[in-house]
Image (spheres, rainbow, N blue to C red):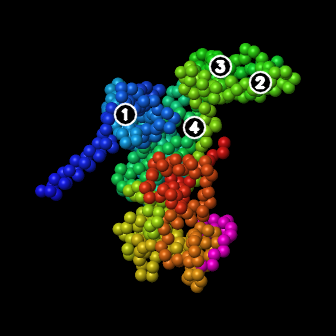
Amino acid sequence: MKKIILLITMTLLFSISLCRVYGAESNYLRAKFTESTVSGTNFKEITITPYRYQNGRKLEDDEETSYYIYLPSGYQVIGKSATFVADREGEYPFTVYYSNYKKTFVYKVDDIDEDEDTDDDDTDISFEYELEYDYEKKQILFHMEIDKLRKVITTKSTSVTNEVNYYVDNLTNNAPSEFSITIDDMNYDYKIIKQGEFYLLIELWPLNYDNYSTLVEYKGYNFTNNFNYTVFPSKDIYEDNGNYEALVKSTEGSSQNLFIFNIDDIDYRRPELETELQDDGMFYLEMKDDFGLDYMITFDGKYVPIGKSTAVKDFKYTHATAIAYDGEYIFTVVDKNGNRNVKTVKVDHKKTAKKHKLNLDVHEEDYSKELFENKGLPYDDSKDEETYFESMIPSYMSGSNFLFKPNSPITRAEMVTVFCRLNDLPYDRNAYLKAKFTDIETHWARDYISMGSAKKFVSGYKDKTFKPDGYVTRAEFCQMLTKISAYKARLTAIPASSNYNFDDTAGHWAESEIIKITSRDLVTSSGSLFYPDKPISRAEVVHAINMLYGYNPSKLELNFINSMYKKYYRFTDIEGHKYYNDIIISAVGMYREIIQ
């Protein structure tokens, strides 16, 4: 009886504890919603702005305040607000976390007009599309099923059909493949990005150009297993060229890949603009635009409209007074809503003969921002000054259940899988038929083992076994790096600058390989012993691989990679680890800054 009472008491205490964590002061978290229509569609853009409320008043957020916001798609946003695009009527849950508080807000959308049934209208084209993998050809196939027979044009053929099977040629890591499908004179644009064994399919829907935006839909794939994959977010809006993120994640298991890619080919129809500082000190600007937009210019605290919505328009602006003093004068041309910085013109004016010399700080960009804020308009810096990153290599090592297990030994199956991913081998599920290993048929890494052994990344044993769950020793790893042909040039390029004399490697069967790897500091040991027959850890492997590939990120690049890791991964067992940076690169991928 005492045990039962004790159990009930502990259960109640645990329940009360949970209430303290996420149930206390249910009204502490509140949220404001705003809704707008996505231009050119009947979709609704929902923006949630959480805030804190206590003792009958709203608490003001400072610059450091951030909320964890989970959108209806499951996508996480960290910040002061988040936006989600709803494409149908219904209730959309937004879950907000702040410190120990959690609250789910449900926003109802009930005014999206359903498309009328126009099946008899030839202009109403409906279709479904997916990526598939042709295991015989080892090639990606774009498959589309159309509602009825229609004229279809691809880069490879023209036909009247209700089905499209388009093979995507030469698809390699981080090199987007772009193609268009034309159906009854309607053009549909697609982009495919490959990162290792993961694929991201992007469909682009250009919207009203007045809004400078493109709506995209994502689909994610991994053909090495039978998992179902979803993408967070499932839809996005490209407001400008730049870096975008999409997380492809399995609905079962922990298989996932973060795509960070650069969009640089979106046509936003920027106007032509010419400026001149004339001899008399007058600033002159002329802009040609045929897109029916309105513009204004800021200078010295003034907003000057320089255009009206007409089909074709030449905008001309002459500054009201001559520029007479030394200093840097900044004229900023924006669209009428302040959404886009079309052009920032800097005029460096020097007249040494002048008695008065002024440095006109009023024309600095920060002041321009204040002008916009005072007018109630948002201000966006020029995208040209943002830092963009491109993927050098996709993630090649994963964890599970929030653990990376950095100090655990790496298995032979894990090792060959890493080599296959790094070398971008086309996936072949029939390779095991030729491998003839007797102990891999039901193993999760069967296909990687077969593919890797065919490329001589690894070898089996004389008894025709592979021992996939056996550990890779430090000596074996050194031998693998020296024997893989793809790595010979990389090793040669690294200077052999260290000279270790380990007491336990002389006469070892892998002595020469150990010397070659340790002299380049790819695998090291702190004492006089190398422990060649000891299993090598997962962290030591990713460190060696990153050094082999020359991945020494700058501070800016490392900060970017770390921010992506903390946003999407957060292993609980690597903080403070000696090889922390190498581990997050193996999980997220390596990214380099794009030099504009």
Q: Which mark is residue 241?
A: 4
Tag 3: amino acid: Gly
Q: Where residue 131 appears, x then y in whole percent?
A: 43, 49
Q: CA distance from mark 2 to mark 1?
A: 50 Å
Magenta part of the chain = 485-502
**Which comes before the other along the chain, label 2 or label 4?**
4
Q: Which mark is residue 358?
A: 2
Determine whether label 2 and label 1 are within 8 Å by CB: no
**Which comes before the other along the chain, label 2 or label 3?**
3
Q: Which residue shows up at 37% across the image and 69% down it?
A: 441
Compare residues 278 and 526 and report the one nearer the observer: 526
Q: Which residue shows up at 55% across the image and 42% down it?
A: 243
Q: CA distance from mark 3 to mark 1?
A: 39 Å
**Which comes before the other along the chain, label 4 or label 3?**
4
Q: CA distance from mark 2 to mark 4?
A: 37 Å
Determine whether label 2 and label 4 are within 8 Å by CB: no
**Which comes before the other along the chain, label 2 or label 1?**
1
Label 3 sits on residue: 301
Look at the picture and state if 472 lies above or below 75: below
Q: Is residue 364 magenta?
A: no
Compare residues 316 and 575 and report the one nearer the observer: 575
Label 1 sits on residue: 29
Look at the picture and state if 341 lies above or below 457: above
Which quadrant, please, contains the N terminus? bottom left
Mark 2, secondary structure of its residue: loop
Q: Which residue shows up at 56% across the image and 54% down it?
A: 590
Q: Where residue 377 appears, x then y in whole percent?
A: 55, 23
Look at the picture and state if 275 lies above or below 29: above
- The answer to whether one can see residue 232 in this image is yes
Q: Which residue shows up at 42% across the image and 45% down it?
A: 231
Residue at the far bottom in the pictured view: 507
